[in-house]
Amino acid sequence: MALTADGQTTDDRDTEAIRGLHEAVARQRAAFLADPSPGLAERLELLQALAGMVVANRLAIQEAMSADFGVHPTIATDLIEILGVAGRAAYAAERLEGWMAAEPRDADPGLFGSARASVRPQPKGVVGNIVPWNFPYDLSLGPLVEMLAAGNRVVLKPSEYTPACAALLRDMIHATFDRDRVDVVVGGLELARAFTQVRWDHLLYTGSPAIGREIAVAAAAQLVPVTLELGGKCPAIVAPDSVDAETVKQILGTKALKNGQMCITVDYCLVPRDQLERFAQLAQERVAEAMPGYGASPDTTGIISMRHLRRVEALVDEARGRGCDVRTLGTAPDSPDPARRQLPLTLVLDPPDDLALMREEVFGPVLPIKAYDKFDDAIGHVNAGERPLALYVFTQDEDIADDVLRRTTSGGACVNCAAAHGALASLPFGGIGQSGSGRHHGIEGFREFSNLRAVFVRGQDDLVEAFSPPYGPAAQAVVDAAFGPA
């Protein structure tokens, strides 16, 4: 048992956090029952407050990100964690009236006369969000946009790996929203376990497939609907016509974002065997010319912890020990600074599939480059594995790109770039199978966190009574109209 900074034991802190969780849920549940469906004006006000909150706390968010990651580029924080959230809120606000409107559906007038049918979205209720460490604000406040747009009340649980970001998130939320609308609970593993035991009206989890399975089992025990945003080995298929400087620039740029700690980064590439060396040389040239000193640059995000850093190093060490061609791009210090935890970009050329590097999601600045002999082999390699969260294809031939998209399955996809789909508020974000289920972002996110209620309003001149026994001439007339007289 350890002591926390304020002199409490960790057990005491966990107990207090769990108590706070249950109090938050009870408070929100009561508020929801008292006011189950906020109107458009109230929802727009909440979205405006959310956008204003991240902009007003810009410097504090930058500082918290740097504190937790050791190094985190302030521009990346601005673009993703602040502007990304504010832009997503603005997008939802502009379209919310249409999203909330009842959607008319067809009702056969021959059977139902002048009846009206529609789908009316209504709030699900109290929603939980288990937030990962790699994007502490984008993946807490981003989904909060659609949760609030849908009229819900929300409890956020940030990661224990980002304590500075978690504390700031809690303080910002408490200063901006009533706690019966949005709340934040901060704690470690025991709180995370307790969070999954709550009977939420919906639960969002973003993280690894292994923990995702545990979340799904816990949620199933209470019949809680879940959205699982999981990881995966997102491939980039490079066609023979696109092993060029622009393709390499796009792939390395995406891999460098967050130093590979992103679920939709390029996890590995598939490149024609006879152009494998050309790809590697282009990568060396790109880093030398445009990214000198990347391994120790202020633009290089630190690995979140020494444990994660050692894991990434172990992946490379295993590949090197197996005789793989391992190439560090640019220069790097002999030993990472524990305070900054930065690693250089590294290529591993044509590694065997049984390496941990090819079996696990890398989640670091290491890029395996697999060689293929026939283009169909590249597609076959992707289809032989689990369905990825994202897939990227690089080609100048639109027919080839369309063929890859037709013959593969993934949560999202990009052509001639990578990860851009995740930045669009208009596109649904999510996985399939091993990489997750459900969607957030845009109208799909609004619908994910809404109960799409089917509503039928009876009119005049119908045959509704034909469906109820005892069956008489009206029911027989319906059957005869379909099958003919007996």
Image (spheres, grey):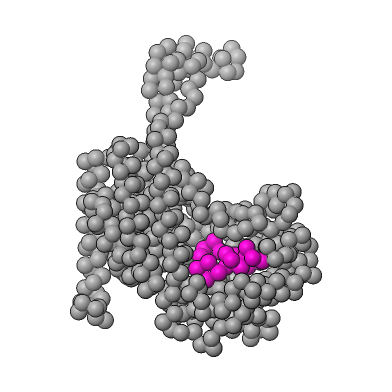
Give the quarter of the image for residue 113.
Answer: top left
* Residue sitting at the far front: 289
Give whichever of 218, 315 is nearer the camera.
Answer: 315
Question: Is 262 inside the magenta-drawn segment?
Answer: yes
Q: Residue furthest left?
A: 7
370, above or below 215, in the image: below
- Say which of 153 and 114 sits in front: 153
Q: Position of residue 463 (x, y in %)?
A: 44, 15
Picture layout, residue 8 above or below residue 108: below
Q: Is residue 223 visible?
A: no
Horizontal and vertical percent position of residue 266: 59, 65
* Residue at 66% across, 66% down: 248
Q: Check residue 77 for magenta coloring.
A: no
How many labels sit on residues? 0
Which stretch appears magenta? 247-270
Q: Where's residue 394, x and y in %?
A: 69, 58
Quadrant assignment for the C terminus: top right
Q: Quadrant of the N terminus?
A: bottom left
